Amino acid sequence: MDQSEDQILAEELAALGAVAGGSGRLVRVMAKLMRKNVHEVDLLVPLPFDDAVKRVSGVLGKEGRTVGAVPTDSEEDETIRIVAGGGAGGLNPVVVTARVLKADGHTSEVWLRAAAKEGLIRQRVGEKTAVRLAAQLSRATGADKAGG
């Protein structure tokens, strides 16, 4: 079953609230009311599709844990979703979704999206996480930004 970013973030924040001795249920409700900081980056990766999928999976796998399967319709399209830690002390959960698309035989496109809930103090955790991971992917593959 595919969960939305908002559902995943609410569950992650509720789990943190419960660990801190709070009410997970109350935190879950509050998380649904919080605004979301989202940032997207497009990359052109100079790797064949299968190698690009392995590279993106490796970079994201080091940053967080995989959550939920994201179904795809094609053999030239792979989506990877993780929850990483961001913000002060890495305590703010960030849902990162990377979609790898086959561009041609030697090149792949990567669409990277990071989303996090924002409290009263804007930390832009989604934006910072997307930019940081895009930089890691670019260094790892020699990719250039195609947009974002």
Image: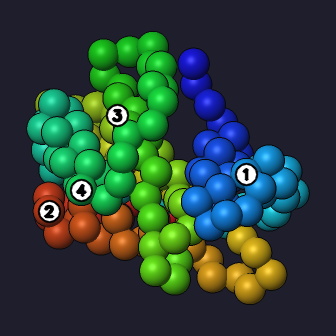
Instruction: Tell me the residue that label 4 is attached to.
Output: 62
Residue type pointed to by label 4: Lys
Which element type, helix, strand or loop, lies under badge 2? Answer: helix
| Residue 91 visible, this orientation | yes
The mark that comes first in sequence, 4 or 3, is 4
First reached walking from the N terminus: tag 2 or tag 1: 1
Which numbered circle lies on residue 140? 2
Residue occupied by mark 1 = 24
Instruction: Name the amino acid, label 2.
Output: Ala
Q: Look at label 3 and name its amino acid.
A: Leu
Q: Identify which residue, 49 or 84, lies in the foreground.
A: 84
Which residue lies under the disc numbered 3? 101
Neighbour tally class for label 1: few under 14, some 14-19, many 20 plus, Cα within 10 Å: many
**Looking at the image, which residue is at 36% across and 26% down?**
77
**Image quarter in which the N terminus is found:** top right
Marks 4 and 2: which is nearer the front?
4
The percent position of residue 71, horizontal first and vertical second, equals 47, 19
Q: Closest to the observer: 130 or 119?
A: 119
Q: Secondary structure at mark 1?
A: helix
